[in-house]
Image (spheres, coloured by chain):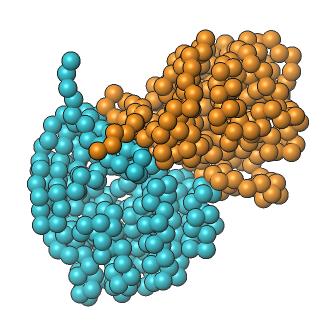
Chain colours: A orange, B cyan
Amino acid sequence: MKSSLWIEEFQSDHSSYKFEIEKTLFSGQSEFQAVDVVQTKGHGKMLLNDGLIMVTERDEFAYHDMIAHVPLFVHPNPKNVLVIGGGDGGTAREVIRHPGVEKCTMVEIDKMVVDACIEFIPQTSKDLTGDRVNLIIGDGVKFVKETKEKFDVILVDSTDPIGPATPLFGTEFYEDLKNCLSDDGIVVSQGESPWYQTDIQKGLIKILDGVFNDVFLYTFSNLTYPGSLWSFTFATKKYHPVKDFNPNRVTESGLDFDYYNKGIHSAAFALPSFIRKNLEGLIKND
Amino acid sequence: MKSSLWIEEFQSDHSSYKFEIEKTLFSGQSEFQAVDVVQTKGHGKMLLNDGLIMVTERDEFAYHDMIAHVPLFVHPNPKNVLVIGGGDGGTAREVIRHPGVEKCTMVEIDKMVVDACIEFIPQTSKDLTGDRVNLIIGDGVKFVKETKEKFDVILVDSTDPIGPATPLFGTEFYEDLKNCLSDDGIVVSQGESPWYQTDIQKGLIKILDGVFNDVFLYTFSNLTYPGSLWSFTFATKKYHPVKDFNPNRVTESGLDFDYYNKGIHSAAFALPSFIRKNLEGLIKND
């Protein structure tokens, strides 16, 4: 009989996901959090922050497609993009696939996450050293307070509101974000689980509602986040995420995605009733 | 230190879901399979067949809404509905919420499943004894071969193609189904996981393609099936599931659902690219 090594992440107090591990590739403790990269048996390499699964090679395309391409195909001409967090590099990788994007500034607080992903997960990190990526190791909260730049699209690619990501779930952060957003800008943020984390989700949306006029929610599915159905918030100064979306632009881009497509774009904003009911009056989805 | 009791279901060889159990309510071995009903700590009561999770009270609405209301709101006047399997009763419960449905015949092979659900899970089974439900304990494969009735909508609410459900994944069964389907009828079948069971899914769709002209796939999310994103096939003699869908009928019905709504109806047929690519040429989704 052979023993086997498993990682278990709790979705709630009474349910969990388990993944079989082949070996640990990296294990460190940064100033901010524990950082681990492991080789799983069925899901490729996996990044964990403080023991929570951030990314696996098998399904990371779902999250990264949906955080990046939804706003980038709504905004008609995004040139200057900001990513807060996203240390694994997958979000920046998708952003710069849009040839019109002149610069993708990425502000990640934890150098250890970036370094571990560059060394062990090139699938997500491969473009972090590219010309159009301006990688800043620093505090995103401080960055948006101090920058004089204006961004067309801002992506808040954060972990849960525990540890270093906590201030990313605050009103002051979003007021500062709004100030560095262009007049027709869009902010997309990691929006938590509609099944298991409805309180965190509702809290984030209330903060966004206080800062922006129009806040929407959209969903996607992956294999590793609790409940698998996951969400992004879409806060916008001008463009409607569905009515101002031109599907032809997706076709004309010639880009090929494993999750995103012109049909899934609008479909992602059609929410199951239990989500609509829970967020009634807080979001502008039709 | 207190010990705790958990049930673990494997999604694949190298990943699993776990749910904490409070106590076992029923445990039996029928002629066909092991049947268990347990009280979980976070997901209500749970039915298991041969150790595989069939239903939990917390999220069963997602599956039952989507198997029933999608075809019943496409077909303009469904009067006679057949359910193959569905022993927990949740599908029949949703079918008869449509006042135009005159009769819902349900053919479940395993009396022990029905009896256990009637006794322990009234949430799903509560309408099995109702006037418009014609509950037959018997072999669905034999039933569709012998019946002289014609059905407007047929729902194949089956488990995986192991154990008693194996013949439900066969060409002969679907040829017989087609014969007892009205000229404008629709067949919806449990379509497996687009993440983990793509071979089973593709096999089922190839069988449907051989029998019906037009086969579509649609998805929904729940909390308990491997990968959480799950699918139904939609095989149709006449009606297109999106183009022939009139959203006003949902509004006019006055029915309220926790998952299904007029937006999610069409959105469910917009598939992530990895599913489209895997099923290219086999399904008619746009």
Which residue in the rendered view is the most extreme toward the front? A1
The quarter holding residue B137 reads bottom left
Viewer-proximal residue among A22 and A277: A22
The image position of residue A114, as x and y in percent, is: 69, 26
Judge whether B149 appears above or below A77 on screen.
below
Viewer-proximal residue among A246 and B127: A246
The quarter holding residue B38 reads top left
> Residue at (10%, 54%) from the top-left corner?
B28
The image position of residue B118, as x and y in percent, is: 14, 54
Q: Quadrant of the C terminus of chain A?
A: top right
Judge whether B130 appears above or below A272 on screen.
below
Residue A168: in sight, yes or no? yes
> Residue at (21%, 29%) from the top-left corner?
B4
Q: Give the left or right position of residue A272, taking residue B63 as reference.
A: right
The quarter holding residue A205 reads top right
The image position of residue A236, as x and y in percent, is: 72, 32
Viewer-proximal residue among B284 and B91: B284
Judge whether B245 appears above or below A254 on screen.
below
Judge whether B79 appears above or below B54 on screen.
below
